[in-house]
Amino acid sequence: MYGPVKTPIPPRRPVRTKWSSLVAVCRECSGGKRLSKALKRSLKDAGVRDVRVLSSSCLDVCPKRGVTVATAIAGTVQTAVIDDALDGRAVLAAVILPLHHD
């Protein structure tokens, strides 16, 4: 009668999405929101449609000068600190495109 209540976990079902890769940009870092918007724009301009960019809460890296970016692309998960002065095209070329496979 006492102790944790065990409730059955409902079965999960896979959901199809238009994206196959994720890029999480820390919105707590200086310029995080600006960078995520610039990345979305750069991906669209480059014709890359299967990468989802989202703003996340703190990723607990907290660089003094930069924005923390976590990527999950083609089965590879990486975390990087990006110079917050870089624009979306530079981040796209340096971080996302080398891992992305069409």
Image (cartoon, rainbow, N blue to C red):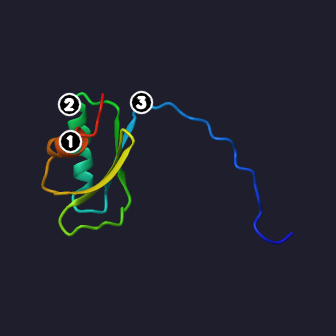
Q: Residue at x 41, y 30 (%)?
A: 18
Q: Which residue is mark 2?
A: 46
First in residue order: circle 3 vs circle 2: 3
Against 65, is 71 above or below? above
Whether the residues at callouts 3 and 1 have beta carbons within 8 Å, the answer is no
Amino acid type, residue under disc 2 in the picture: Ala
Whether the residues at callouts 1 and 2 have beta carbons within 8 Å, the answer is yes
Q: Residue at x 77, y 59 (%)?
A: 6
Q: Residue at x 35, y 32 (%)?
A: 50
Amino acid type, residue under disc 3 in the picture: Lys
The crowding category of the residue bearing disc 2, from other C-alpha atoms within 10 Å (few below 14, some 14 to 19, many at least 20), is few
Q: Judging from the image, what secondary structure is the residue with disc 3 in? A: loop
Amino acid type, residue under disc 1 in the picture: Leu
Please state if 4 lies on the left or on the right of 61 as rendered: right
Q: Which residue is mark 1?
A: 92
Q: Position of residue 53 (x, y in %)?
A: 33, 43
Q: Position of residue 100 (x, y in %)?
A: 29, 36
The crowding category of the residue bearing disc 1, from other C-alpha atoms within 10 Å (few below 14, some 14 to 19, many at least 20), is some
Q: Which residue is mark 3?
A: 18
Q: CA distance from mark 1 to mark 2?
A: 9 Å
Against 20, is 55 above or below? below
Q: Judging from the image, what secondary structure is the residue with disc 2 in? A: loop
Image quadrant where one finds the N terminus: bottom right
Q: Position of residue 35 (x, y in %)?
A: 22, 50
Q: Position of residue 34 (x, y in %)?
A: 22, 51
